[in-house]
Amino acid sequence: MDEITHYAELFRDNAIAYAPRVLGAILLLWLGFKLLKKVDRLLNNSLTKMKVSDTMRPFITSLVSTTLKIVLLLVAVSILGVELSGLVTIVAAMGFAVGLSLQGSLGNFASGILILFLKPYKVHDWIQVDDSFGKVEEIGIFNTILVTPGNKTLIVPNAKITDGVVTNYSEKGIVRLELNAHIPYEESFPKVQQLIRDALAEAPLVLNDPAPEIGIESFDTHNVILAIRPYVDPEDYWDATFESHRVVKQVFHENNIRVAYSEGIELGNIGG
């Protein structure tokens, strides 16, 4: 019974001694995180007024916000009575261990720094990384966020970008479509070439300067394979692709240009 009383008194004394510190730390964290949200907005607005690019602004804001949150947590821990010198040593050791286990994340962070300084692309550019194609919405600390023409959000690790091949469709301001069509060997190529060129000149999303490139790419057993290379604005990439395919099919239909089916050498008509 005496032992229970002893522990009860010990708990009471510690509660009285540490309750103000715990409440103070909780209050500091609550007020601190609310204040940091305002700091984030203020920093973002200030960077906007300073005309910092859309590429750098989210990265700087995220980095400053993360640093301030770490400082806030350290201050809250110090209020609880923990010695910061010892805590820093522990955090450093933990950081080293975590760093070894998160080498991929650290690589993404380093890649993010490289992307911001080397600028292979910037926010609002259309890029392709492997099979991922989209418009750059944000370059973050660890990831680059793309929005596809189908309005899907792709989160691509920065390390994957710096380690691979990135195609920037917006760098030159225009992009060339890589399209193909087939015509039979008996058909006149110069005639088809001119018909397609004239039709593409009327397509609203296809640029006339530079002019579309139309030529023979190769031959197979049944067809002459045409390469059709119109130039378009990056923003119109998919719409222009669909429009160009529609235009080519319409040319074939209106001029009775036949194609050979792979099942045999019989020529078939093309509907409207």
Image: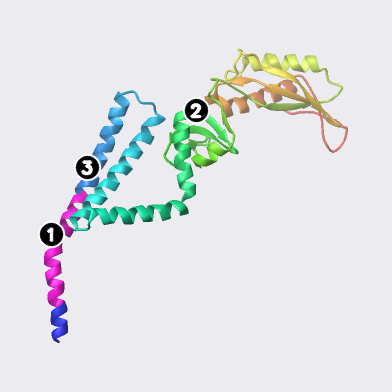
Residue 224 position within the rendered picture, expressed as x and y whole percent measured from the top left: 81, 25
Amino acid type of the residue tagged 3 in the rendering: Leu
Q: Is residue 135 left or right of residue 51?
A: right
Q: Is residue 256 left or right of residue 62?
A: right
- Reading the image, the residue beneath label 2 is 125
Task: Answer yes or no: is residue 164 visible.
Answer: yes
Disc 2 to disc 1, C-alpha distance? 53 Å
Q: Nearer the viewer, residue 72 or 271?
A: 72
- Sequence-first tag of 3 and 2: 3
- Reading the image, the residue beneath label 1 is 20
Amino acid type of the residue tagged 1 in the rendering: Pro
- Name the quarter where the N terminus is drawn: bottom left
- Sequence-first tag of 2 and 1: 1
Looking at the rendering, the stretch of residues picked out in magenta corresponds to 8-30
Residue 45 position within the rendered picture, expressed as x and y whole percent measured from the top left: 28, 30
Query: Looking at this rendering, what residue extends furthest in the bottom direction?
Result: 1
- Name the quarter where the C terminus is drawn: top right
- Name the residue at 59% across, 34% down: 165
Q: Nearer the viewer, residue 80 or 198?
A: 80
Question: On residue 35, which mark appears?
Answer: 3
- Name the residue at 47% across, 34% down: 114
